[in-house]
Amino acid sequence: MRLLLILWFGFLALLGDEGYNGKSIILTLPSPSGTIISHDRNISVLSHPTAPTQGIAILPIDYYAALGDSNLTWISPAKTSLIPLTIKSIPYPIETLSVDPALVTPPLEMMERIERERLQAKEIYEHFTPIRYWNKPFIKPLDTFITSEYGSARTYNGTLKSYHGGVDFRARTPIPIQATNNGIVILAQERYYSGGTIIIDHGEGIYSCYFHLSRYDVKVGDYVKQGDIIALSGESGRITGPHLHFGMMVHGVQSDPLDLITKINTLFETTKEPHEEISVK
Ligand SMILES: [Zn+2]
């Protein structure tokens, strides 16, 4: 009877997932095909790195995502399925920082540059390169103490401006920075807020970002391998002291980079059972 129901409706639901604002979810699916539709974006289903008959979808949850229950829709050639999703909040800390006032309220003559750089970054992060360069586990770009986690609500000189979109690693003196995974250098330039900046395209919508650098060891278009030295840390851009800011973007969303790395790396360690299918009443 249950099978009949499934055949009749041609419509399945999958067991649900839950996630947190700013973090990522990796869905494991029974086949590597189709698209996941969430309320604000479409996400391609990719092949599982170690179990290629299965699919995965890397779903970033925006820092400002609406909390509560919703449904994702998986549209594959064979069928359409619903995946219930619950988004919960995380109490991120508040950080109060003092910086050069020009960096909180930039001078008018800088506004054009800032806007140009913002649009340039948006265009990079929203581009989907249909090649998997990230074919091994991700590593940290350096191995020092973390001075600021992802997600802190940040007040600059008494004005709430933003949240922290990456992780800061201590680097009081210049330290060599490693590529977190294989990829293509897509940007290597000085920028107003992030100073010396490198962005690597790891393919399939995943980018890593390295800010406040003092030296570039790679140039745009270079293919880099996981662990290659790409730069030296520094103290350029909007900053209170020298450190490395490391970020990850996935499908245009700024996600907690260490959370994302941990979850992707799990795919290389074990093969999780795909979602069990259940019928929709
Ligand atoms: Zn930072």
Image (cartoon, helix red, strand yellow):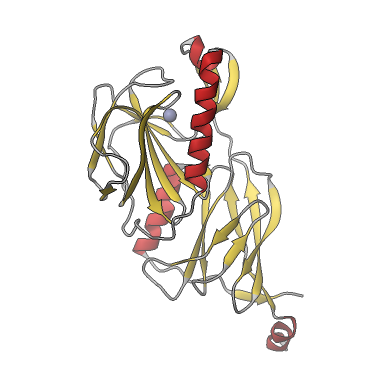
Residue 269: x and y in percent read 34, 62
Residue 57: x and y in percent read 51, 61
Quadrant holding the C terminus: bottom right
| Farthest residue, direction top | 101
At 44% from the left and 50% from the top, the residue drawn is 206
Please indicate whether residue 32 sits to the left or right of residue 211 in the image.
right
Please identify the quarter of the rendering in which residue 136 is found.
bottom left
Please indicate whether residue 185 sits to the left or right of residue 32 in the image.
left
Of residues 179 and 20, the one nearer the viewer is: 179
All told, the count of numbered labels is: 0
Please indicate whether residue 4 sits to the left or right of residue 60 in the image.
right
Residue 190: x and y in percent read 37, 27
At 28% from the left and 39% from the top, the residue drawn is 219
At 31% from the left and 47% from the top, the residue drawn is 139
Residue 164 in view here: no
Residue 182: x and y in percent read 30, 52
Quadrant holding the N terminus: bottom right
Question: Which quadrant contains ligand 1?
Answer: top left
At 40% from the left and 21% from the top, the residue drawn is 237
